[in-house]
Image (cartoon, rainbow, N blue to C red):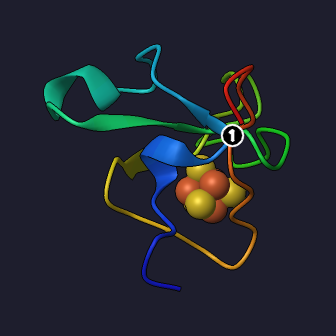
Amino acid sequence: MASAHCESCKFFDEHKGNGASAQGDAGLCRFNPPVSQPAPESKGLWPVVTANDWCGHFTAEMTAAE
Ligand code: SF4
Protein backbone atom coordinates (compact mmCIF):
# COMPACT_ATOMS: atom_id res chain seq x y z
CA MET A 1 0.00 0.00 0.00
CA ALA A 2 2.40 2.65 -1.26
CA SER A 3 0.32 5.71 -0.31
CA ALA A 4 -0.51 4.52 3.19
CA HIS A 5 1.28 6.53 5.83
CA CYS A 6 0.29 7.21 9.41
CA GLU A 7 0.52 10.96 8.82
CA SER A 8 -2.42 10.74 6.38
CA CYS A 9 -4.39 8.20 8.42
CA LYS A 10 -7.43 9.37 10.36
CA PHE A 11 -6.24 7.45 13.41
CA PHE A 12 -2.90 9.31 13.61
CA ASP A 13 -2.72 11.81 16.46
CA GLU A 14 0.07 14.31 15.97
CA HIS A 15 -0.43 15.67 19.45
CA LYS A 16 2.54 14.23 21.23
CA GLY A 17 2.41 11.92 24.19
CA ASN A 18 3.82 8.67 25.50
CA GLY A 19 7.32 10.01 24.83
CA ALA A 20 6.59 10.57 21.13
CA SER A 21 7.80 14.16 21.40
CA ALA A 22 11.37 12.86 21.54
CA GLN A 23 11.01 11.76 17.91
CA GLY A 24 10.39 14.55 15.42
CA ASP A 25 7.80 12.92 13.18
CA ALA A 26 6.21 10.66 15.77
CA GLY A 27 2.61 10.62 16.91
CA LEU A 28 0.09 8.30 18.47
CA CYS A 29 -2.03 5.64 16.78
CA ARG A 30 -5.62 5.91 18.05
CA PHE A 31 -7.01 2.89 16.22
CA ASN A 32 -7.18 0.77 19.37
CA PRO A 33 -7.71 1.72 22.99
CA PRO A 34 -4.61 2.11 25.13
CA VAL A 35 -4.10 -1.37 26.50
CA SER A 36 -0.43 -1.86 27.29
CA GLN A 37 0.42 -0.85 30.82
CA PRO A 38 3.86 -1.28 32.34
CA ALA A 39 2.28 -1.66 35.79
CA PRO A 40 -1.31 -1.92 37.12
CA GLU A 41 -1.20 1.59 38.59
CA SER A 42 0.18 3.09 35.36
CA LYS A 43 -1.90 4.81 32.73
CA GLY A 44 -2.49 2.89 29.51
CA LEU A 45 -0.19 3.81 26.64
CA TRP A 46 -1.12 4.64 23.05
CA PRO A 47 1.17 3.09 20.46
CA VAL A 48 3.80 5.54 19.21
CA VAL A 49 4.18 5.52 15.43
CA THR A 50 6.10 7.72 13.02
CA ALA A 51 4.62 9.72 10.15
CA ASN A 52 6.01 7.21 7.63
CA ASP A 53 4.76 4.12 9.44
CA TRP A 54 1.65 2.34 8.22
CA CYS A 55 -0.40 -0.74 8.99
CA GLY A 56 -3.27 -2.77 7.61
CA HIS A 57 -5.83 -0.60 9.40
CA PHE A 58 -4.84 2.50 7.43
CA THR A 59 -7.83 4.69 6.64
CA ALA A 60 -7.33 7.93 4.75
CA GLU A 61 -8.15 11.05 6.68
CA MET A 62 -11.13 12.73 5.08
CA THR A 63 -11.06 16.50 4.72
CA ALA A 64 -13.52 19.00 3.27
CA ALA A 65 -11.46 19.05 0.06
CA GLU A 66 -11.86 15.32 -0.55
S1 SF4 B 1 -0.60 2.41 12.72
FE1 SF4 B 1 -2.21 2.02 11.17
S2 SF4 B 1 -4.17 2.72 12.10
FE2 SF4 B 1 -2.44 3.58 13.29
S3 SF4 B 1 -2.12 5.63 12.45
FE3 SF4 B 1 -0.71 4.21 11.38
S4 SF4 B 1 -1.80 3.50 9.52
FE4 SF4 B 1 -3.31 4.44 10.94
Measuring from the top left, give residue 54's x and y in whole percent: 50, 68
The residue lying at 75 percent from left, 69 percent from top is: 57
58 is higher (above) or lower (below) than 11 = below
Label 1: element kind? loop
- Ligand 1 is within 8 Å of the C-beta of the residue at disc 1: no
The number of callouts visible is 1
Q: Is residue 38 left or right of residue 17?
A: right
26 is higher (above) or lower (below) than 19 = below
Q: Nearer the viewer, residue 20 or 53?
A: 53
The residue lying at 85 percent from left, 40 percent from top is: 33
- Kind of residue at badge 1: Glu
Image quarter where ligand 1 lies: bottom right
Quadrant of the rendering where the C terminus is positioned: top right
55 is higher (above) or lower (below) than 28 = below
The residue lying at 45 percent from left, 18 percent from top is: 17
Q: Is residue 7 left or right of residue 26?
A: right
Toward the bottom, the furthest residue is 1
Q: Nearer the viewer, residue 23 or 42?
A: 23
Q: Nearer the viewer, residue 64 or 21?
A: 64
Measuring from the top left, give residue 3's x and y in whole percent: 46, 71
Q: Counting other residues with Cα less than 10 Å from the Cα at mark 1, is it few (<14), some (14-19), or many (20 or more)?
A: few
Toward the front, the furthest residue is 65
Toward the top, the furthest residue is 15
The residue lying at 16 percent from left, 27 percent from top is: 22
Check disc 1 and report the residue beneath it.
Answer: 61
Measuring from the top left, give residue 29's x and y in whole percent: 61, 43
Q: Is residue 51 left or right of residue 36?
A: left
